Image (tube, grey):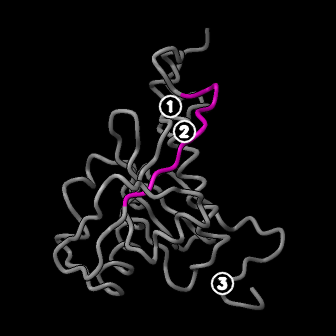
Amino acid sequence: MTGHPNALPSGHNALRFEIVRDQQQMMDAMCIRAICFMEEEGVAARQAFDGNDFQATHVVGYLADEPICAIRIRWFDGFAKMERMAVRKAHRNPRIVKAFAEFALAHVARKGYPKAITHAKPVYARLWRQLLRFEEVIDKAPVLFQGHTEPYIELVKHLTVPVDAISDKTDATVLFRIEGEWETRSNFEIQT
């Protein structure tokens, strides 16, 4: 790679995003969060990692085989919560952040959720608003957490749910398939 260390080569295909499906990918996502939250921000491990990690969908981004970003998505009635988004410092550029967030948001919409929310410190809330077109929720007070000097602002993005969103009308074989790989027949499906 030449030029700026954050630059992606023209026509590259080394940047990819994946729904976490195995232990290695989960470890990659947790490593990204440890680097970004514990090392850079000074967040305690018990706050950076909690019981919600086991009830969430995780997405990890790779540049070639190197994990560079991660996000956790939790599911609620009518919305998904985007949280713990972390991008390694050397890879923080608008192009990577936007592509990564758009991948995660497309997954949320494909699961039939019309809304995504997040909570962010003011400096990061600006990024969510400007780059990702989230809107600040003005009728809810910001939340201050122990060990943080600034409150977290709630932001929302309304999504267009695609016509092929996963729903109770979706063919049962699709509902048995791997998360995010709904177009790929499983090895256990019998051809009819």
Q: Which of the two discs, 3 and 2, labels the residue nearer the N terminus?
A: 3
* Secondary element at tag 3: loop
Total labels: the figure holds: 3
Q: Are marks 2 and 1 in contact (CB under 8 Å)?
A: yes
Of all residues, the one furthest to the right in this rendering is 11
Residue at (16% x, 75% y) in the render: 146
Report the magenta residues as a range: 154-165
Q: Is residue 174 above or below residue 97?
A: above
* Secondary element at tag 1: loop
Residue at (83% x, 68% y) in the render: 11
Residue at (53% x, 52% y) in the render: 104
The amino acid on which the numbered mark 3 sits, given as a three-letter code, is Asn
Residue bearing mark 1: 112
The amino acid on which the numbered mark 2 sits, given as a three-letter code, is Ala
Q: Are marks 1 and 3 in contact (CB under 8 Å)?
A: no
Residue 172 in percent (x, y) is at: 48, 16
